[in-house]
Amino acid sequence: MVIAGRRINGAAPSRIRVMRVIARMNVGGPALQVSTLMRGLDPEVFDQRLYAGYVGPDEADYVEQRARDVSVSRVPTLGRAVRPTDDLRALSALVVAMRRFRPHIVHTHTAKAGALGRAAAVLARVPVRVHTFHGHLLHGYFSPAKTRLVVRAEQGLAAVTDRLVAVGRGVRDDLLTAGIGRPGQYAVVPPGTTPAAAPTRAEARERLGLPDDGLVVAYVGRVTRIKRPDRFLAVAREVRRAVPATRFLVCGDGDLHNDLQSAADLRDVLHLLGWRADVETVYAAADVVLLTSDNEGMPVSLIEAGLAGVPAVATNVGSVAEVVQDGKTGLLARTEAGELTRHTVTLLRDEGLRRRMGEQARAWTAQRFGAERLVRDTHDLYASIAVARGWWPAPLPKGADR
């Protein structure tokens, strides 16, 4: 094998083959991270293949919008919906693909792909299985009985997984508390991204049909139950009473989009943008970014807002506190509308505070959540596996002769 131009044990040159599996490449954090890794990992060292299903009718495809350079092998039945017959077809298709590609590592992303991809890897006798938790389903998704079934399933899957990756310490700790995996299995690898060039504030507002003056609160993400669009509307109504000139942007779509459309009392100030490829325009137009979720992993929307220099008001759930430094780069709240409203009004009424928090957010997120760091962390994870398996030689100690 050749690693950085070196032969190992006289073997023919080859690369570590990584098969990456995700249920669908809808706009959001998992698709962004997968795309970053597909682009960023050294192709002379890693031979990667990406397998994914199709997005749902209320979702936007990240590959079409922002990653046309990323090659995807489609598995039609590997989508969001759980249908036993389709899931068996997806499992069979993944097993066939693995036997053809013969990956050294199968790395799965998102819950459904994690279950089917790891099961297929066991059946295809793939040497190493890795799974990334971009969040978890432990709170806010299912009834207590169904949540217990999910936990038991994840416990069983963890037993056949070599390494578990969590996007934040909070996510990892929640999973460990639920008995999913062992501490030594986990690596914490936060998301990473590179911000697109943004227009000026005036240009952004002109593109979005907003007045140049006035204040703007933005929400970026799926419009679905776990994200609590009802709470967003409640906050918007109270903020409007306190700061009447405020406008609200929603960049995204989902099954509860009609709930936003039906908010007649906000019709003049609520701008529903749908999915946009130029999300940087939304951040450039905004004064504050608002997140109202009941559960999150590590929201990429807050990372993007920080990189754009926009302070955030967010519920303190999942690993949100690892993105937003409370009182420094934004303000965190409990999962209730009153506290979110008070924090939002505080920022809207204090331009100097917004500016200071925005500057600190840009510096903090650029240091911690860059694309190069995500690629480096993932390279190091795979390298540790390769050394442990004997595929790569152990690195020489620092200072040793080479």
Image: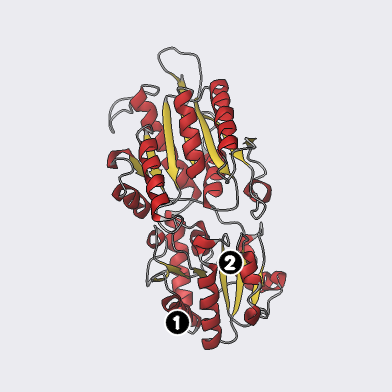
Instruction: Identify residue type, mark 2.
Output: Tyr
Whether residue 264 sits left or right of residue 5 in the image: it is right
Q: Position of residue 331 (x, y in %)?
A: 41, 72
Depth order, front residue of 191/92: 92
Check the picture and name the quadrant holding the C terminus.
top left
Of badges 1 and 2, nearer the viewer stands: 1
Q: Which residue is mark 1?
A: 346
Q: Establish if 114 lies above or below 28.
A: above
For the point 62% across and 35% down, which residue is it?
Answer: 75
SS for callout 1: helix
**Cα–Cα span, label 1 and label 2:** 19 Å
- Is residue 288 among what the camera can see? no
Q: Establish if 397 lies above or below 287.
A: above
Residue 283 in which image quadrant: bottom right
Q: Position of residue 276 (x, y in %)?
A: 66, 59
Depth order, front residue of 94/281: 94
Coloring scheme used:
secondary structure
Residue 233 in which image quadrant: bottom right
Q: Position of residue 14 (x, y in %)?
A: 51, 20
**Labels 1 and 2 touching (C-beta < 8 A):** no
Q: Which residue is mark 2?
A: 283
For the point 42% across and 73% down, which residue is it?
Answer: 336
